[in-house]
Amino acid sequence: MSNRPAMVIIGAGQSGARAAHALRDNGWEGAITLLGNEGVAPYDRPPLSKAVLLGQKTTAQCALYDEAFYREQRIDLRIDANVQQIDRAARAVVLRDGHRVGYQRLLIATGAAPRRLTVPGATLEGVHVLRTAADALNVLDELSPGRKIAIVGAGFIGLEIAATAIARGCEVIVIEAAARALMRAVPEIVAAYLVERHRQMGVDVRFAVQVDRIIGSAKRATGVKLSDGTSIACDCVIAGIGVKPRTELAEAAGIDVADGIAVDDTLRTNDPHIFAAGDVCSFPHRLFRRRMRLECWKNAEDHARIVARNMLDRGETYSEVPWFWSDQYDMTIQIAGMPGFGVTTAVREISATSRVFFALDRDGVLVGASGVGQVSEIARDVRIAQELIARRACIDPTLLSDRSVKLKPLLAAEAL
Ligand SMILES: Cc1cc2nc3c(=O)[nH]c(=O)nc-3n(C[C@H](O)[C@H](O)[C@H](O)COP(=O)(O)OP(=O)(O)OC[C@H]3O[C@@H](n4cnc5c(N)ncnc54)[C@H](O)[C@@H]3O)c2cc1C
């Protein structure tokens, strides 16, 4: 184990790779070790359920950087380094092969693991999740025209897979245990609007029903038995039932965990030498006045930028307004803030195919905006809404609903 001052990052995913880059950009000249366990260099996950499943992009094309980048930036990327333990007393991480890597500052960016079905039959062949590039290739293999795909979970991943499976000529059923789609993410009206589109495209979406068992023959899944007694034949089952933050290493090392590794607003854990970023951590959000954990690309990127600076003792607080997007059919969904925290919704009909749904909390404060439709028609309003959310603006819902009222002047008025 070398005694050189070192920044060590566990998790060569979105946050980990971007943080390594940001450490260099912020002038860190010492060693950077980026420890990954997927056997491939860091890549972007969002295309996995979109362009990769549509056959428009290979997983190799999703790489965040080319090989030369790590060499040029002197980032020691290890793609088969499974971290088994954090030895806080010795300030070292222990790899599965017994090697130890000492750190001056440690970043835990281990992301989240997909929840798997636990019902009888869940280990049959043809039952999938989608988190990694390897998962995407397995799912891609299943999506041939005419095959019947059962998707469990009407969250963003499930709905994106439904849309790509339809585009590939599959027959699709989506089975959701809750009474509606996207329970945590958006208000009911937004979810209903999206589900309506899926139904128009031929997806059989069923709510308030669970998969009790996966039916199989010769080791392979051939159907699902539902809690309402129906059995549905299918060629494969894809579970999109959420993720669980990978907190095991932190917990075992005695680092505080609260639905994710608990960090302060500088993304530092209760150990001053250890930070966490991305899907794995929960952090206090100044605007929303609560601790939250996000599972989205922009959060992973923003966290990486800030955490790198704070690993260099800049002490910057994190307070970005969350932003998320999804693509389904020819629609883009852009979400700013936390629409799920709203109690009333104002709907702005931009065109026959585009809407922005504004979510206001009990005090009339704008807390979220969900744009659904054509990017060119919704992006601007969602961007302005993001700034209004940052200012905790209270805006008359009738103004938000009226598409003849421009949002930009409302922003200017808020600044007064
Ligand atoms: C299919 C898919 C589609 C998505 N689409 C969108 C989208 O449209 N819009 C959006 O905003 N977000 C989307 N997301 C979410 C976004 O990709 C994630 O929020 C982001 O990847 C989180 O980055 P992260 O660095 O926190 O975690 P990850 O990217 O998951 O990286 C964590 C890495 O740590 C590794 N690791 C874990 N434990 C260890 C260990 N002990 N030792 C070594 N390495 C370890 C993991 O294997 C992984 O490589 C999507 C995600 C998926 C899976």
Image: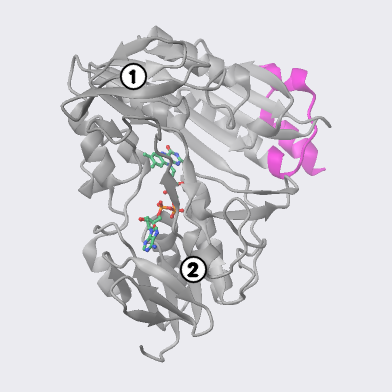
Q: Which mark is residue 107?
A: 2
Residue 108 placement (x, y as % from top left): 48, 65
Q: Is residue 76 magenta?
A: no
Is residue 124 found left or right of 416 in the rendered image? left
Is residue 290 found left or right of 173 in the rendered image? right
Up/down of 324 relative to 201, above or below: below
Identified at 46% across, 30% down, the residue is 156
Is residue 25 found left or right of 78 in the rendered image? right
Q: Residues within 10 Å of mark 2 (few under 14, many from 20)?
A: many
Up/down of 192 relative to 132, above or below: above
Residue 414 placement (x, y as % from top left): 79, 39
Provide the secondary structure element on which disc 2 rests. strand
Q: Say what amino acid the circle numbered 1 marks.
A: Val
Q: Say what amino acid the circle numbered 2 marks.
A: Leu
- Counting the numbered discs, the total is 2
Is residue 348 found left or right of 114 in the rendered image? right
Q: Quadrant of residue 149?
A: top left
Q: Is residue 397 magenta?
A: yes
**Residue extent of the magenta highlight:** 388-416
Q: Nearer the viewer, mark 2 or mark 1?
A: 1
Disc nearer the start of the sequence (2/1): 2
Q: Quadrant of residue 222?
A: top left
Residue 9 placement (x, y as % from top left): 42, 69
In this rendering, does residue 56 appear at all? Answer: no
Q: Quadrant of residue 232?
A: top left
Identified at 62% across, 50% down, the residue is 320
Q: Residues within 10 Å of mark 1 (few under 14, many from 20)?
A: many
Nearer-the-camera pick, 119 or 126: 119
- The residue carrying mark 1 is 224
Provide the secondary structure element on which disc 1 rests. strand
Cβ of mark 1 under 8 A from ligand 1? no
Mark 2 vs mark 1, CA separation in Å:
41 Å
